[in-house]
């Protein structure tokens, strides 16, 4: 069972859910500054995805936990991140598969799905641990609504 502590995100939504998952993936960071990380190597990534909203769907879910696993774990587990050219690129630093970019990409994939649901909850935070000593938190900018 996965139990990790991670910072919580302040918000005013009534419901918040969190999904933990792990995936094994290989990557390299194609930048001079990355040193040894320019070489292909692998991690068992740990991700925590935080989703919040005020409205549940017709199943009584904010979002089905199993869909989150399918969107992220099933896509990236046992993959080479650099080979996923839909999400990553070796040419643009903002799309190198660093911890920061992978965390943001997870958030974008999840939000893209949530935007097409009836209750449209929001992905507020992705916590992504790459090694026992390194992790990143990604929080998208709040969307200002006129509703
Ligand atoms: N800001 C970032 N810095 C680094 C990233 C990154 O994604 N964002 N990535 C790497 C490497 O890919 C590496 O996987 C992780 O590096 P690091 O934490 O330095 O790993 P170590 O095991 O060597 O660290 P210890 O301090 O010895 O535990 C590098 N930097
Ligand atoms: Zn790495």
Image (cartoon, rainbow, N blue to C red):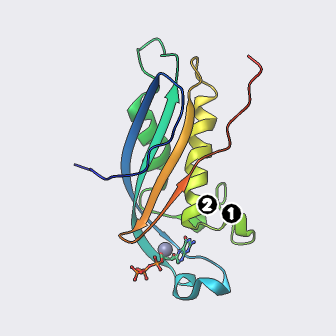
Report the side of 100 relative to 72 (left or right): right
Mark 2 CB lies closer than 8 A to ligand 1:
yes
| Residue at mark 1 | 95
Report the side of 96 relative to 136 (left or right): right
| Residue at mark 2 | 101
Where is residue 88? Give x, y as percent: 65, 61
- How many numbered marks, from 0 up? 2
Task: Look at 66% across and 87% down and name the residue there.
Answer: 32
Position of the C terminus by quadrant: top right
16 relative to 82, above or below: above
Q: Count residues near mark 1 (Cα–Cα under 10 Å), then give few for <14, some for 14-19, many for 20+.
A: some
Of 53 and 22, which appears nearest the observer? 53
Where is residue 20? Give x, y as percent: 36, 46
Gap between marks 2 and 1 measured at Cα: 6 Å
Q: Please tell me which of labels 2 and 1 falls first in the chain.
A: 1
Contact between marks 2 and 1 (CB within 8 A): the answer is yes
Task: Look at 54% across and 27% down and name the residue there.
Answer: 12
Task: Look at 41% across and 15% down and name the residue there.
Answer: 60
């Amino acid at each position: 069972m996965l139990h990790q502590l991670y910072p919580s995100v302040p918000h005013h939504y009534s419901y918040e859910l969190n999904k933990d998952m792990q995936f094994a993936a290989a990557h390299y960071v194609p930048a001079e500054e990355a040193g040894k990380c320019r070489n292909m190597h692998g991690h068992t990534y740990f991700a925590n995805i935080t989703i919040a909203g005020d409205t549940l769907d017709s199943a009584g879910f904010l979002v089905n936990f199993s869909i989150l696993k399918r969107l992220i774990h099933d896509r990236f587990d046992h993959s080479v991140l650099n080979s996923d050219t839909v999400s990553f690129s070796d040419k643009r630093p903002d799309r190198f598969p660093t911890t920061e970019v992978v965390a943001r990409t997870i958030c974008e994939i999840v939000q893209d799905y949530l935007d097409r649901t009836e209750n449209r909850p929001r992905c507020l935070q992705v916590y992504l641990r790459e090694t026992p000593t390194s992790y990143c938190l990604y929080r998208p900018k709040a969307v200002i609504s006129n509703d």
